[in-house]
Image: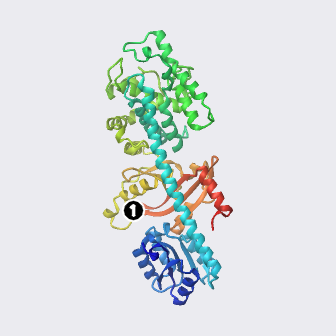
Amino acid sequence: MTEKEQKIKILIADDSEMNRAILAEMLGEGYEILEAEDGEEALDCLTRHGTTISLVLLDIVMPKMDGFGVLTEMNKKHLIEEIPVIMISAEGGAEAIRRAYNLGISDYISRPFDMEVVRKRVTNTLMLYAKQKQLLEMVAEQVYEKQKSNTLMVNILSHIVEFRNGESGLHVIHVHMITRLLLEYIRLKTDRYDLSDGDIQLISMASALHDIGKIAIPDEILNKPGRLTQEEFEIMKTHALTGASMLADLPVAQDEPLVRYSYEICRWHHERYDGKGYPDGLSGEQIPISAQVVGLADVYDALTSERVYKKAFSHEKALEMILGGECGVFSPFLMECLRELSGTIKEDLEKGPADYSGEGGVSIRKAEAMFRERQNRQASPVPRQRSREEAGDGRLGGEDLRRLAEGLELVYDRVRLVDVSSSAQYRIGREGELTAEPYDCYRIWDRKGRCENCISARAYAGRSRASKWERSGGGLYQVDAMYIETEDGPFVLEMIRKLSEEEQSELLRIGRGGSV
């Protein structure tokens, strides 16, 4: 690689040759300078060099296409997200500056130029974008490693817990799958349990521990091929309290959500809605929803799996037995969810864990579509969009949205579309379909009305992008918003992620002068 190829590329777009020369001289020989004398030439340069350009210094008033036109095209091509722009102009009016920021510029420098100011602002902008890319890469890697570790942990636990009773280890994985499906579907049907994405993920993970207490059950009872005596059954029942006690004795913060959910599930997944379960005889909504759902998933998979003491029942027979009350009484609402989701559950289990994403999978989205079609509540699902190639008009189609969402979900905790006019929010399905959620977009921040600093409204108004930090529930969140156009109209794409403690510390360090 030559010395020239190693230099940072900066594009200076200005119709004045003298201004371009002055800026190039101010920046010094440490950069590779590209020049454009009008907006069209600037766009051509951006097209040819792409994201190898690290920064654009852009004049407002230029022939053929002005600076605002260049910014508009950069937004359409999503280059503004990758290449920072510093606007340079003698047009210092508030309206021009406001319009430039709405179109996504990072900074504004007015003429006449001050060499020290130009150098500092260029350096700061380059450092900020480099740090942002570094953080995004770090988060993407952390998310990937976390997902991989979570899957590995489920598999390890399933084999440890079930090794002693001669099972394959699939029971824990199946319970995890069914629990997640049910929780996602419950959230679609009602807001009574206030389930967030994080809650669903944690409860699904905690379900792997539901039978951890069986480690303490004697082998001769655990693996008895015939029916248990009443005395043996009483010993078997102790696994619920034993598992809960093991978790209560952990030398970790007991108020951690994962520990709390695990305790609820271990202790109460054998409770029944009519109060005739064990160990505490809880009834109705005294039983936490985490334990209710895992208890139902546990019964279903136990019925449809082969055990040392029985053959496997068919999916249809298992449903008949559960709905008929042969396995204890469950919540009528959960029974309704099980009936409506039964085909999806059967499909996922037949695919097996190798085809299961652990994060909902295609079948979750099919379940959402099925629910919306049947209930027709609040808003019908937006029809599946065509791909961009099918549309032929440059607007995002279903395939584009699917690919975009899949890529962003590697970095962000939540990706959603927001209709600014109605505050409605939509999920992007695995097949590119949009499904309306039952809550206004600001519900995620526990607000009862639109946010005072609504970046979606700003991004929509400026046909641009915007970012902010949002505090909620003791955590700090990065929120990015970007205007996009689909076949069904304009939306704002919102991307949300919670910062780790390390990232928050790093931001504080930068804010205190840790960077140039």
Q: Quadrant of the C terminus?
A: bottom right
List x then y, in percent, for residue 385. 36, 57
Measured along the vertical axis of the image, is residue 27 above or below residue 178?
Answer: below
Q: Quadrant of residue 117?
A: bottom right
Q: Is residue 82 left or right of residue 122?
A: left
Please state the horizontal and vertical placement of residue 38, each as a whole percent of the image: 47, 84
Q: Residue at x 41, y 42 (%)?
A: 371
Residue at image position (45%, 80%) is 42
Between 235 and 414, the residue placed more toward the observer is: 235
Residue in view at x 51 percent, y 36 percent: 203
Instruction: Kindly identify the residue that appears in the image at 36 percent across and 21 percent down.
Output: 307
- 149 in relation to 381, above or below: above
**Residue beneath label 1, please?**
396
How many C-alpha atoms fall within 10 Å of the one at disc 1: few (<14), some, or many (≥20)? many
Q: Relative to the observer, which residue lies in front, 310 or 501?
A: 501
The answer to whether residue 476 shows anywhere in this view is: no
**Quick one: which residue is furthest to the right in this view?**
512
Q: Which quarter of the figure is the N terminus placed in?
A: bottom left
Q: Is residue 103 visible?
A: yes
Amino acid marked by disc 1: Leu
